[in-house]
Image (spheres, rainbow, N blue to C red):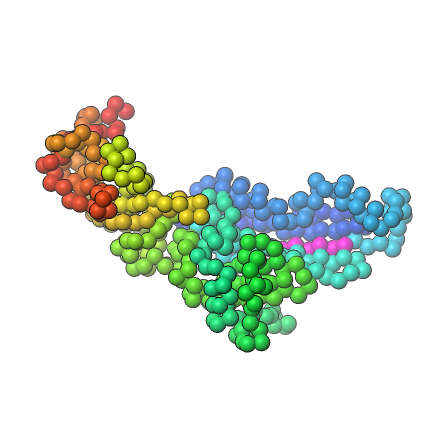
Amino acid sequence: MSQSFIANKIVVDTVKLEFNILPIIKIESSIPQLKISSNQLIATKINHDLKRYFFSSTTKSDTSFLLKSFLKDNLITVAELEDSTDLKADVINEFFNISYISNDFINITVERQIEPYGGKNQLFFNSLFYDLRTGNRLSFSDLFSLNTQKLVELLNYQGYRIEYNDVNLDELLIKIDANDKIDNSFLKDTLEVNCIDFYLKTINKKLFLAFKFQCSGPQPLDYGIPINLLKTYITYSGLKNSLKLWGSGINSLKGKSISNYTSQIDFENYSILEGGGYLISKRNKTSELEFGVSSWFSKDSVFYLFEKHNFINNIKTSNILDILKLSKNDLNDKNSFVFGLCQTQKTNYDSEIIALVKDNKKNPEYFNKIIKAWKANRITQKFEVLDRKKVKKCYNESYGI
């Protein structure tokens, strides 16, 4: 099975593995393995973690323990095991599903059906979210700013129980009513670990945030709520991109926060790609807070975002204070943009000044021809236009290279 995207080709292959200790156990697994064109190291990191959720790829190292435990529990010897004609293997079937995939993240669900010899069938379920830009696992709190109490309220008011048609396994949505309400204490500990997992699922062409209750039991229950009802609670940039939640254009970013791992932002009608940036030096201490300027590119324009950096859930984020827009015609092969390396007539280097300068093919130490200039003012937290005549010169970072 494969699924690809133009900007960053992502391929999901299936590797089939079998692991048998007859007559004790028989395991068949289909394990997803990713290939990412932009960074195979990230794919390797994800693939290594994925294998931990499949018996056939983890049991081999525990074979001796497994065999000894089986013999001890059943009070038989190896010789008796070899001669036995009555014993039959426990059968474990594992399969995965790609619940959701985009350029930014993937959601893979893993289901295991265990048929113990002489016992009842058991079902186990795991839902795994991975950031395809970092290879890190994503938790519920990475994707949503939604506490348990509010989630229960939304599910009970606007959610559904998800059942399946016995004939063709089509999903059936049954509105949660008074007799089926979810208790807050029932959900309380489940979003982090244990017996409830969350996943994304498309039903009737609508994307749902779904939950599988009693995930390690014979009869798991599924509940869900349309994702469009949770727009205000979505914090993860990858999900915002998929649902086009950033707004209509660049100006909608003002006052919003973006993760430092965000390299692309998809608006309703166009996208922008991150192109680097710089931190404003604290040597002329206007503020102890950390500020910076990042550059972003669309098809026709270049945008500079004035940012204040914070940490949310131990992830560095940038709050967008102001936006400066330039045409790509301004940044041609005859001009350069200089960050934080310009001098005014009255001061030494001012780290808040950014300038568009006339390039010089001789690669001088300083640029003296200033076309336009601005100040990223940490007090007003805005870009302010500067009189270009007040900027004396700007240092050339490429000097001597």
Residue 73 in the magenta stretch? The answer is no
Question: Between 365 and 218, which is closer to the camera in this rendering?
Answer: 218
Give x and y (percent) for residue 54: 64, 49
As displayed, is residue 60 above or below residue 364?
below
Residue name at image x 74 percent, y 55 percent: 91
Q: Residue at x 74, y 51 (%)?
A: 26
Quick check: 228 above or below 350? below
The image position of residue 183, as x and y in percent, is 56, 67
Residue ID at (87%, 48%): 75
| Count of number-bearing discs | 0
Q: Tell me which corner region of the image, top left, top right, bottom left or bottom right, holds residue 215.
A: bottom right
Q: What residue is rendered at 30% in x and 45% in y?
A: 307
Quadrant of the frame with the C terminus: top left
Range shown magenta? 90-95
- In the orientation shown, which residue stands out farthest toward the top? 400
Q: Horizontally, is 121 left or right of 318 in the view?
A: right
Residue at the extreme bottom of the image, as rendered: 178
Between 262 and 153, which is closer to the camera in this rendering?
Answer: 153
Q: Is residue 37 visible?
A: no
Residue 7 lies, in percent from the top left, at 40, 48
Q: Quadrant of residue 333?
A: top left
Residue 204 in percent (x, y) is at: 49, 69
Q: Do we see residue 344 in this rendering?
A: yes
**Secondary structure mostly taken by the magenta-highlighted segment of the chain:** strand
In the picture, measured across the screen, residue 215 lies left or right of residue 350, that is right
Residue 365 versus residue 387 in the image, above or below: above
